Amino acid sequence: MITKFLASQLRQPSGWFGQQIVSRILNRDNASMNNLAFRMLNLESKGDRVLELGFGGGYLLNKILQSPGVEFVLGVDVSPEMVEFCKKRFSSQIKAGKLKLNYNNTVNLTNLDCNFTKICTVNTIYFWSDVKQTLTQLHQILEERGSLVICFNSKEFLKKTTLPKHGFRVYDTEEVKKMMKGVGFKNINWIVNSEPKQQFVCIVGEK
Ligand SMILES: C[S@@+](CC[C@H](N)C(=O)[O-])C[C@H]1O[C@@H](n2cnc3c(N)ncnc32)[C@H](O)[C@@H]1O
C-alpha cells in the first residue's frame, strides 16, 4: 500500500527525503518506462533541442545528454529539490551550456524562451491541472515536425493501487490520444507495456 506521504513525495519530492531518497527510487523503479520514452524520442537528427518536463532524479535527462546529436536540453520540474539534485548531478553539462534546469510547472510553459524539436514527459500527466491546456502549450513550443513523447502508468494498473485515492488522476490510452489529436498532434503512435509488474503506455505525436 502506498501511503499518503509517499504519494505526495512521488507527486513532488520534497525535503531531505525527497532529494536523497525519492530521486533514487524514481531512477530505479521507473527505468524501463524511461528507457522506452528514450527509444520513442528517436534522437537521431543533429541539432535536437529537447525539453523534459518533470525530470525527477534525472534518469532520462542522463540518457538524452549522452545522445550525440543533441544540441541543448531544458529540464523543467516543479520540485526545487529535484532541480537542486540534478544541478549537482549534471554540473559539468550545465557549465558547458548544454543543459539548463528550471523550476517551473505545467501552467507556465509558454514563457519558456525556446522552441524544441522534441519534448518528453514521463509519469507527470497524473498531476497536470488541465491536460488539454498543457498539451496545447506543449504543441505551441514544439517546432514544425517536432514530436512529443508522453509515458504514463495505465489506468487499470493505477486503479489497483492506492494512488488515485491520493490525488493521482488516471488516464487511458484512447483518452490521451484523443486529447493530443484535439490540440493538433498528428501521426500518433503508441506502445503498451503489459507485464504484470509494470503496465504503462508511451504515446508519441508529431506537430
Ligand atoms: C513521479 S515523478 C517522475 C519523475 C521522472 N519523470 C520519472 O519517471 O522517474 C514526477 C516528477 O514530476 C514533477 N512534477 C509534478 N507535477 C509537475 C508539474 N505540474 N509541472 C512540472 N513538474 C511536475 C515532480 O516534481 C517529479 O519530479
Image (cartoon, grey):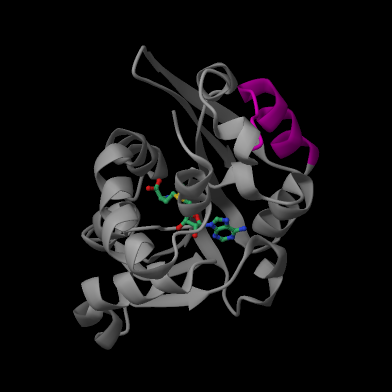
Q: Is residue 186 left or right of residue 4?
A: right
Extreme residue in the bottom direction: 95
The x and y percentages for residue 180 are 70, 38
| Range covered by the magenta-colored residues | 168-182
Q: Residue at x 51, y 26 (%)?
A: 190
Q: Is residue 150 left or right of residue 174?
A: left
Q: Residue at x 36, y 76 (%)?
A: 84
Residue 207, visible in the rendered structure? no
The vertical placement of 138 against 35, above or below, is: below
Q: Which residue occupies the foreground of this view, 4 or 153?
A: 4
Q: Main secondary structure of the magenta part?
A: helix
Q: Residue at x 40, y 69 (%)?
A: 15
Q: Which residue occupies the foreground of this view, 106 or 43?
A: 106
> Does the magenta segment cover residue 55?
no
Q: Which residue occupies the foreground of this view, 201 or 83?
A: 83
The vertical placement of 207 against 194, above or below, is: below
The x and y percentages for residue 49 are 44, 66
